[in-house]
Image (spheres, rainbow, N blue to C red):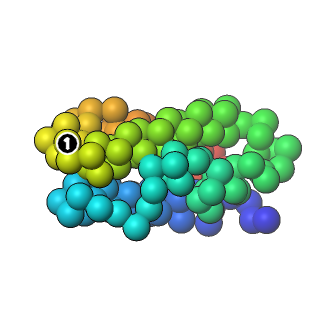
Amino acid sequence: MGNGHDEIKAAIGAHGMWKTRLRTAIDRGSSEFSTATVAQDDHCDFGKWLAGAGTEMKGSRHYTKCKDLHRQFHSAAANVLKLALGGQKEEAKRILEKGDFATISGSLTHEMMEWDKAI
């Protein structure tokens, strides 16, 4: 396991891609992902890394904050996807762009960047 820089940088990019995936799901009304899968915060690479992080990483205040925000991110993404798949395009777009997803995603990215600087 690395010192965290690579994992955090990869996670920032990977989680940024979710906005694109969710926009596509809203436009198409379908997705290759299920809401149940998206809601699970321990299935993506960053979630797996967080779960297996060493004691040094888990002792960081950034770890605790990122873990909580990461859980919230997956919950918000699953909610947007649920709305998109249910045909509620306008509500899904609102949450994606200006609602919970946007807020949580921005906070998670900010906290990951701060953690990366602190390592």
In which quadrant is the N terminus drawn?
Answer: bottom right
Extreme residue toward the front, this view: 86
The x and y percentages for residue 2 are 75, 65
The x and y percentages for residue 44 are 59, 59
| 10 lies left or right of 64 | left
Q: Nearer the viewer, residue 24 or 32?
A: 32
Q: Can residue 117 be seen from the camera position used here?
A: no
Callout 1 crowding tier (Cα within 10 Å): few <14, some 14–19, many ≥20: some
Q: Is residue 64 above or below residue 1?
A: above
The x and y percentages for residue 54 are 83, 50
The x and y percentages for residue 82 are 35, 45
State the residue at coordinates (20%, 63%).
28
State the residue at coordinates (54%, 42%).
70
Residue at image mark 1: 88
Q: Is residue 64 above or below residue 77?
A: above
Q: Amino acid at mark 1?
A: Gln
Q: Nearer the viewer, residue 56 or 84?
A: 84
| 75 lies left or right of 94 | right
Q: Nearer the viewer, residue 112 or 28?
A: 28
Q: Nearer the viewer, residue 81 or 17?
A: 81
